[in-house]
Image (cartoon, helix red, strand yellow):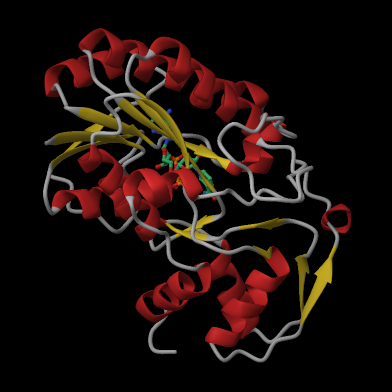
């Protein structure tokens, strides 16, 4: 199968290209080539997805069987400060990918986020729960979902949460680096979700593509199993690395980030489990593997 991945130089995109390259012909597009570590993607096109003609040219020339749309502006606080940029990349960029794909009859897998929810629930969010984003990032991602649902005949929207992986700046690496300085850490304790390893999500996306689910219209929640707060996540990272640094839980208010985040955004994987006949592993297990692979022996 020929698969085109947007955002192929990003944290998820790079792992996804690697995972897909085993069995498929992978074409990557991104605003810039890989940041240091190249994936095994055979073909790469430098494309700004906000430029319709550029996106159209590449998609029409490549004629992929399916597109995984992972490109986005993912800086949650940046989106809050620069709404126009967030709209342009997350909304207009998706509109361009969706319109060209529909014209060419290509199904799209859109990667979306738990931040489309307001966090008021106390049980994991299912796909039919009403979204209610609290910030610009979540709102623009929700807009992108709506565009995909409205303009495409065949699509899968995959919502995921709290990604970390080898090919991007992430919370796990930050905690390890800060923890090693020995300074006491203050970490938010009133936000709960499921940390998700990009490699695990990439494998789940590969299964979705192979299953033919994309020849329909589907929304799926996919995160590593289990839940924790950022503070519990940080403590587990340090414990697995044998770093004895004190971690103090603080409120989101005290942390003072520009964008409001949901207090509880755990996603229920039930539909994915049932449809694909498989389960995501617990976040602690995925984290242990990541730390072992990326940070040397534990
Ligand atoms: N990170 C998370 O915790 C998280 C959680 C839930 C869902 N998601 C979703 O998962 C997907 C992948 O996220 P990620 O963490 O892997 O993000 P990422 O590392 O920022 O990857 C996104 C890629 O898209 C590129 N891009 C940005 N603007 C573009 C444009 N105009 N044209 C073409 N490419 C462009 C980015 O380039 P630059 O680096 O130069 O901007 C980057 O290489 C996103 O759709 C995100 O919304 C992420």
Q: Quadrant of residue 230?
A: bottom right
Q: Is residue 191 left or right of residue 91?
A: right
Asked if residue 187 is positioned above or below residue 295 in the image, the reply reads above
Q: Is residue 122 above or below residue 76?
A: below
Residue at image coords 27%, 47%: 207
Q: Position of residue 194 (x, y in %)?
A: 58, 58
Q: Nearer the viewer, residue 278 or 170?
A: 278
Q: Residue at x 35, y 56 (%)?
A: 278
Residue 148: where, in percent of width, then height? 44, 19
Residue 21 falls left or right of residue 9: left
Residue at 76% across, 44% down: 121
For image coordinates 52% across by 74% down, the residue present is: 284
Task: State the image coordinates of residue 195 (x, y, percent, origin top left).
Answer: 55, 60
Residue 264, x across and y down, in percent: 73, 51
- Would residue 66 appear left or right of 196 to someone viewing this image? left
Q: Is residue 106 above or below residue 296?
A: above
């Amino acid at each position: 199968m020929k698969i085109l991945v947007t955002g192929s130089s990003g944290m998820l995109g790079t792992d996804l290209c690697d995972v897909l390259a085993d069995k498929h012909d992978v074409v990557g597009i991104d605003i810039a080539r890989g940041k240091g570590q190249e994936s095994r993607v055979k073909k790469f096109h430098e494309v700004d997805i906000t430029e319709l003609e550029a996106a159209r040219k590449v998609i029409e020339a490549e004629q992929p069987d399916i597109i995984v749309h992972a490109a986005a502006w993912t800086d949650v606080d940046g989106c809050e400060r620069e709404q126009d940029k967030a709209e342009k990349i997350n909304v207009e960029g998706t509109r361009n990918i969706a319109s060209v794909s529909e014209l060419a009859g290509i199904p799209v897998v859109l990667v979306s986020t738990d931040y489309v929810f307001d966090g008021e629930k106390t049980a994991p969010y299912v796909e039919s729960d009403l979204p209610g984003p609290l910030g610009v990032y979540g709102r623009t991602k929700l807009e992108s979902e709506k565009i995909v649902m409205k303009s495409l005949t065949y699509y899968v929207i995959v919502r995921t949460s709290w990604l970390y992986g080898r090919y991007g700046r992430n919370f796990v690496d930050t905690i390890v680096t800060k923890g090693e300085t020995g300074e006491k850490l203050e970490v938010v304790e009133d936000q709960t979700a499921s940390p998700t390893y990009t490699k695990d999500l990439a494998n789940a996306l590969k299964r979705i593509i192979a299953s033919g689910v994309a020849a329909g219209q589907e929304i799926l929640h996919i995160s590593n199993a289990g839940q924790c707060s950022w503070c519990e996540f940080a403590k587990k990272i340090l414990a697995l690395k044998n770093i004895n640094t004190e971690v103090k839980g603080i409120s989101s208010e005290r942390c003072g980030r520009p964008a409001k985040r949901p207090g509880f955004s755990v996603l229920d994987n039930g539909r994915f489990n049932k449809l694909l006949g498989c389960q995501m592993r617990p976040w602690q297990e995925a984290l242990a593997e990541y730390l072992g692979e990326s940070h040397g022996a534990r």
